[in-house]
Amino acid sequence: KASLYKGLRLRRSDPIPTAPLAVVMNTALRHEASTVCQPMATDCVAEPGVEAAQEGESALDPLASQLGPAEQASDSKRQGEGDSEPLAKVARLGIGDLPSPPTAKSAESLEGSSILPTSDPLIASDLPVASNLGSPSGDTGSQLAKVEEKTGGGQESECLPDHLEPDANGKSETETEQASESWAEQCIEDVYYPIGYDFTQAPQLLSGAWKEYTRTVENFLKGCKWAPDGSCILTNSADNTLRIFNLPSELYTGELDDLPEMSAVLRMSEGDTIYDYCWYPIMSSMAPETCFLASSSRDNPIHIWDAFYGDLRATFRPYNHLDELTSAHSLCFTPDGTQLFCGFDKTVRVFDTSRPGRECEKRPTLVKKRGQTGIISCIAFSPEHDLYACASYSKTVGLYSRDKGTVLTILQGHQGGVTHVTFSPDGNLLYTGGRKDPEILCWDLRQPGKVLFSMVRSATTNQRMYFDLDIYGRYVVSGNTEGTVSVWDTTLTPTEGPDPVLNPILQFHTQQDCVNGISLHPHMNLLATTSGQRKFPEPAESEDEGNEILMTHRNIRAENSLKLWLCSQRPAPATQASSLGSGSQSKGSVLELD
């Protein structure tokens, strides 16, 4: 349960946490201290946390050797600046694995030590991150008060063994540990709980960003993706710019009313149309060296961007058989982050994440006119099996073995080019959707080629239409061309017949334009949606012909925005619950193009 809430963040102005709170956070987050694969490396080492702080070791950035002199000088300058941290970094600092709280005997010796958090502490108000996002109980202050009453006071004892020697609070070491463990279990039960989406009613609009995308004509969005640790969200838009928005700080304290408009903390511009982008899968704000993302654009190499500073950290340069630079149409890191898979025309190239450059492994999808044809539009890895799926604009989906890229099967059944695929958490089901295709298909991989059911949506645009699956594999959420979001419950029974159809359990209006981006938060009951599409001019009216105006956007309405929705059990106000469409208009920006 503790792993669901790595989204908790520190603030520099908070006081030092009390001992019971530190014990609880250390106990609850100790599951995160297991070995993970470091970025840009092939060996598995302990996650950078309290061990590195105790030994005084600093995390080594594996990409530092790949940077040029200018970038290294820039990094050295930033390290010497001290307090001048970027806004994106300060707002996303993580708590990590907190050290054990100091005892009465060691408090004086630890004073001034770097082991205990003195400048970036965590307080009780930061603990119930999702207490107002569907928590059964969020009264953490009263819990802390009860703990203080339980741990305070006591009678002194004399001539006792070391493990029974009373501490500063009059409790023996054994009694203190038992009380801490009991309180930790109670806190975990009350505060750390699984995500519980409530789709029995329309979600509540919390905040969003629209002014950011109205400065340029036809700057429509092309999707959004939450960071793996949930601290920020990444968007792509028609101005060839990737933007990072931090999660509103009010959500950590439960202040959900009248949230201000979100503003981008980082902007990373590409030279041409952005084809695809993805986060590093084990990205964590607690380890800055893991905070990066990959992007691919037309006539440009694959770029690796720093998610704290927005700098270019490395490039992967794929070349074709004529030794010409070619662009990747899709990107996807392996779940452990050691490799980067890139989709091309009838080919998948595999780069070693720790070695930027041009060296890569080529895996053709079409050999001797057998296999999968077309451009590989998206790639997804199975969470439980050693295989990956490649979707193609040729209306097919191929399954391949991860080690050698051997084709296992080719799935056919879509009416348009497949643009998005995702696996269920158990790896037994595969969901696929395409452009100008009204269906999202659910494939049973235990019986390759069998479609369990389809989910109908309106997708009449040529752009990529995203959908998302919650971490439990129960809900499928997707937008459509008319600005409506549909939710399907995969545990329900679809209709009978040769082509089973799963009906949605909820449909609600979010924007006044095509909802092309959908992303569910990895740790909270939050939903992010993006809207917009390319608008083509219409023939001008008769009175405009004298002004030599042949085509116009006068009667075309567009809404290019990012919106954040609350999908919890907390009831929304009557004005928003009754008509969510009107609420979205009040906080949106609907443009009438001239």
Image: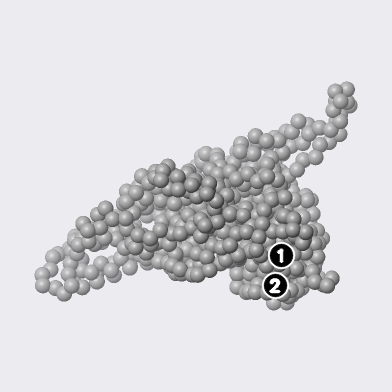
- Residue that appears at 43% across and 48% down: 79
Q: Position of residue 93 (x, y in %)?
A: 44, 51
Say left or right for 427 vs 259. Answer: right
**Mark toward the start of the polypeptide (2 vs 1):** 1
Q: The residue tagged with tag 2: helix, strand or loop?
A: loop
Task: Name which quarter of the figure residue 557 lies in.
Answer: top right
Three-letter residue code for mark 2? Gly
CA distance separating discs 2 and 1: 9 Å
Nearer to the camera, 203 or 5: 5
Q: Which mark is residue 348?
A: 1
Residue 548: x and y in percent read 86, 25
Q: Residue at x 71, y 47 (%)?
A: 273
For the residue marked with disc 1, what is the amino acid?
Answer: Val
CB under 8 Å between callouts 2 and 1? yes
Give the residue pinned by disc 2. Answer: 405
Measured from the top left, where is residue 47 in percent x and y?
44, 64
Residue at the far left in the pictured view? 158
Q: Secondary structure at mark 1?
A: strand
Report the front residue among 41 and 110.
41
Q: For this rendering, which residue is in front, 570 or 98?
A: 98
Q: Is residue 441 visible?
A: no
